[in-house]
Image (spheres, rainbow, N blue to C red):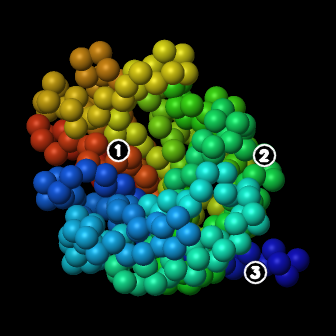
Amino acid sequence: MLKVLITLLITNLFQLIQPFRIVGWFNGNTTQIQQIPFDKYTHIVTGTPILYENGILECNKADYQTQLIQSLAKQNNVMVQWRVPLPKKNIILEWENYPSIRYNYMNSLPKALHDCEIDGVEFDYEWEDRTLGKIGIVTSYMAERYTDFLQDVKKVVGPNKLVSVDIGTWGCCCQGCGYPLGFLPWVNVSRFNAGEFDFVNVMSYHNQYFENIGYWEEDYNYLKNIWGFNLSRVNLGIAYFSLNTTFYKINNEPLWADLSNRCPNIEPEKNICEGIAFTGKRLNYEIGAFAKNHGFGGLFPWTINYDSFENNNTLIDWAYNGTRE
């Protein structure tokens, strides 16, 4: 009973002190930095530390692009997280086989963050190095070990640095997304809810289903009622790319930044541009409002530079305005 009360207290405090998040990756080039809408995003994931073969992580002083983003983000009270790589394939389930690499990795990360003045880390490990993981099957043992790793990272970086992770949704996501059997959560939900790391970004990239918000509503049901996530720690995903697929094979991924030029000033209710489905303006607004009104802690548009900043076609403006409803 005491443990339950403590968990509820942590949850309620978290909800009170955390503003609504909009977390965006930036994987563009230096010329695109000027387009970043710092007034819309609360967190930006960009850049990586140097990772040596022995597991040591180091601030990359030559990464001038990330330094520029970090400087601009600081001026706008926006947090910056690194996308931190793992030192070896399969290592999440095999850390005990690499004690020296584990020691170096964990003990060098805090200094690397400090030296580059980075606010935290994000992991985008999608189980692609596991046979079961490639089709979305993540067992409870796999989720437990991944949570062990994330908890260890949080312990070494401390309470003032963020630790987050990208996770799949039920069935994950859509035709072509590569996780047709994703019916189990990628982390231990109870431990996550108790605060062992900070938040998750859900890859709700429903690229084939743009008629309405229905598939995001199903994500809500799975995340809250079936998997049991504390939604205040969950950021709901929006794809700013489309998919050209054959069954579960992805042929290519047209970006809204490119499609936008073909449909300038497109009507808000439209979700098709020259025959290609995308997450339209009105749908972005509805997803933003839905996330805010149903207890999600934030949004996860993927990615910042996949959006269009021309032709009156900027999607993040609509998603952001939805959260203000």
Residue type (three-letter) at the residue carrying disc 1: Tyr
Separation (CA) of disc 1 from disc 3: 36 Å
Determine the residue positioned at 28% across, 42% down: 306
Q: Of the residues under marks 1 and 3, which one precedes in the sequence?
A: 3
Front-most of residues 58 and 249: 58
Residue type (three-letter) at the residue carrying disc 2: Thr
Q: Point out residue 83 in the picture as x, y percentages from the top left corner.
A: 44, 61
Tell me the quarter of the image containing the C terminus.
bottom left
Helix, strand or loop at mark 3 = helix
Q: Point out residue 34 in the picture as x, y percentages from the top left corner.
A: 14, 59
Q: Nearer the viewer, mark 2 or mark 3?
A: 2
Determine the residue positioned at 61% across, 51% down: 89
- Give the vertical position of 223 relative to 104 (above or below): above
Q: Of the residues under marks 2 and 3, which one precedes in the sequence?
A: 3
Helix, strand or loop at mark 2 = loop
Residue marked by disc 2: 139
Q: Nearer the viewer, mark 1 or mark 3?
A: 3
In this rendering, does residue 320 appear at all? no
Mark 3 closeness class: few <14, some 14–19, many ≥20 residues within 10 Å = few
Name the side, left or right, on which 145 lies relative to 33. right
Separation (CA) of disc 2 from disc 3: 28 Å
Tell me the quarter of the image containing the N terminus.
bottom right
Residue marked by disc 3: 6
Front-most of residues 131 and 266: 131
Determine the residue positioned at 56% across, 39% down: 217
Residue type (three-letter) at the residue carrying disc 3: Ile
Residue marked by disc 1: 285
Q: Could you tell me if the residues under marks 2 and 3 are in contact, i.e. CB atoms within 8 Å?
A: no
Q: Of the residues under marks 2 and 1, which one precedes in the sequence?
A: 2
Determine the residue positioned at 52% across, 31% down: 177
Q: Nearer the viewer, mark 2 or mark 1?
A: 2
